[in-house]
Image (cartoon, helix red, strand yellow):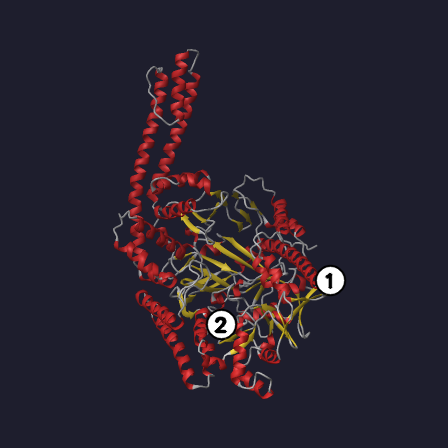
Amino acid sequence: MTSPPSPHHSVPRQQTDQHVQFSDSSWSIWRWTALRGTGFPVNQALRLASPACQTAAEECLHAEATVRQTKQATIAQLKDARGDDADQRKIITNIIHQLHADKSPATTNVPDHLREALATVAQAQQQRAEAHARFAATFTEATLISAQALQAVVATEPFQRALVWQNRKIVASSVQHFLRHPLTETDRDYLRNRSVLVKYLHRYTMKNDTIGFFGPVGWCRWDGQAAETQYDPGADVIARRTTYLEGWGINAIAQAIAADPAVLPWATPRLMPQIHLTPGLLHIPFAKPLPLSPAQSAVLMACTGDVTAQTIAQRLVPQRIPGLATPAEVYAMLAQMQKFRRITWSFDVTLENPFPAPALQRQLERIELAAPRMAAMAKLDAYLQAAQRVQAASTDAPQLNQAIEALETTFTTLTGATAVRSTGQMYAGRTLVYEDCQRGGKLTLGAPALQTLERPMALLLTSARWLTFHLTQAARAFLRAAHTELAQKNGTTSVEFAEFFPWVNSRLFAPDSTLFDDVRSQFQQRWAAILALSGNERHPRFAAADIAPAIYATFDAPGPGCATARYYSPDLMIDAVDVAAINRGDFRFVLGELHLTMNTLGSLIFTQQHPQISDLYAATEQDQPEPQILQLTSSHLVPATRSYQSLVLPKDIRLITSTDVCDAPTSHTLRMGDLVVTSNGAALHVQSRDGKFAFDALDVLGDFLSLVIADDFVITPPSAHSPRITIDQLVVTREAWRIPITEMGRLVAKTTAESYLNLYRWAQLNGMPQYLFYRTPKERKPGFLDLASPLGVELFMRELRRLINTEVPGDALLSFSEMLPDPHHAWLADAQGNHYTSELRIAVVDQKDRQA
């Protein structure tokens, strides 16, 4: 069993160019850490808030409380005064009923002392009515002031440019409609457009989305020997901007070019990844082998993925195989194999390349016939010239809008396809072109910040290791059972990976899968035993030194479970007013998420904005010295280029499970049709048919497993109320609430003012802070809610009404969580003193099973 490091024992900290080691030496973190942050300052959204409206709402709640108190006191007096007289009892009972119904009863035939009590109630009710009237007037005025503040932001070029990049149709619809109408407009379309723009403003100012200049990528360094945290904001928020073409758009151009039969001899045929060949036979998963003619067999065997159709013809024609006597016959056979979905045959570029156009250009340049080559190059050139005009206009909203429209028109003309896809989906690479930016400034996180973090973080990571180990053990048992079932079904000892892979995936990703439920439940139960919460706490705090022995004893595990599970990626926020507060120790860390079994810094979105990407490759090489087998992600699963993993080393092997291509040489790629799954009784292996490659089955499927378990680090089960749990100066979970939508529906009133007051009252009763995030069953990303913002509440109530009016399950829930840090503790500032929300994305490496 692992013993906890003594909190009183100073361990010399090891630090390399790429890693900093924790005092618990089984953990190290990458020195480079991504700094995600908004591109618009928080004050732009805070301008929509109205302190006057909030004060008026508080006065209403106070007046309502006074009415309740005076009514309760008066009802008690009335009950005591009922006496034995039947008529008197009837009068008083009727008065009590009226008070319960919040009416003002008549005071005739009532004793004087009771008449005075009823007058007190009437006075309180009158004051309440006056408070509500003042609130209604204040709310109307506050809404106009907030709309004016919104109008000022929406009218700016940067805000409109952000919208053009994301959804340029909104500029022509919502923006123009909102700006040309008076602030007093109550038209339904105006109010809807106003809410749409509030939602975008919230996204650009309050949520750390990484996209474009409104969500630039920064990089910072941990330095375990620096005496303090140092920050230079730089001259500008944006240090570098780059325009990228989505790979799917370039591939669509490639497919359009390949539609001309004259260019196909210089395109590359590739076997479908799931099939394999033996002499005279074609093997397809879950089917009997199909006989092949000599011509079919020869052509398919030649489709290795690294030679053109012309080269195949040049090799096969001299062999005098019947049916392949001429290049034309070879091409005809290739076309037939393509029709039967045995091969792909086109010009293809990998989506892993952030600059795919040159790769396509190189393929087109090898077309030997001048006319088709020039025609093909002309199509690509037209597209690239339109893209260059987008880049040239990238800092001017109107020109950018026109340039993107021209690019979309060019694309549709060239391909016949629509220029926007997957509308409404996240991470889908919806548009043809996008911009990503590098954040300016320089941040070094010093030893005091690291020491503050590592004590509680080591405890979380220790429990995460236990969770990962047992999840991977459950996965191993599942894979062994899958192999046994398929082997028995087929009457073989080995199993085709092309059959094993879809069988496993269909169960791993099944919505009703319970494969890992027991481990998840045990994990939460173990945390519950350590924390021993009564259920009534709101903000329990724990000292790391007090709970460390129980953590290390309860969550002892030999290692992460498999090589691909070695990485953990915490998202951390710093709750501080500024960097000076961090150096004073007046701060805390807040854990957003702790992602298991993956290094989230490897995405192109981050690596492309790194000032020295070779450092990231060096860190990866140190962490994974052995060759890894890495999945080539399917474009159907990850359609956006910027989301692809990029930290692939030359020694690594790529697993091909789809028709997508990669830049690795064929010597370092394995099609799933080339693989079989074998068992030696103790372990399951995936190996190539020629025996050159063999990997642990879980390492082969680790990327897919990560998609299932990456977000499983949840220490408390969902409940109506979850407390904010803090260990030392690390907030592990933020306070949260889960409310049935049916209950929330009671807050919707005839007017927005009444709905605002209902929501504000309800939030106060539940102890909610002013700043919240909420998540609906219809949205993957949370929304921001400022209870002092009339327009923010209007947006929330609009979304709530839409939920109520659509078909959602009767037990559907709305989730709320406190915004922590709140906007007033956004430490990240620019040179002008504007503040931005931010978070650190960290790579942690588990070295336990590698230690001597």
Q: Determine whether the residue tagged by mark 2 lies in a helix, strand or loop.
A: loop
Query: Which of 658/263 is in front?
Result: 263
Report x, y in % for residue 692: 67, 75
Does residue 632 sit above or below 105 in this rendering?
A: below
Q: Is residue 211 left or right of residue 458?
A: left
- Give the numbered dot on residue 353: 2
> Which of the 4 image quadrants contains residue 314?
bottom right
Q: Quadrant of the N terminus?
A: bottom right
Q: Quadrant of the C terminus?
A: bottom right
Query: Which of 592/728 is in front?
Result: 592
Q: Is residue 408 visible?
A: yes
Mark 1, residues whose alpha carbon is within 10 Å: few (<14), some, or many (≥20)? few
Report x, y in % for residue 290: 63, 72
Tell me the kind of residue under disc 1. Ala
- Give the numbered dot on residue 330: none
Residue picked out by circle 1:
682
Cα separation, mark 2 vs mark 1, equals 39 Å
> Which of the 4 image quadrants contains residue 287?
bottom right
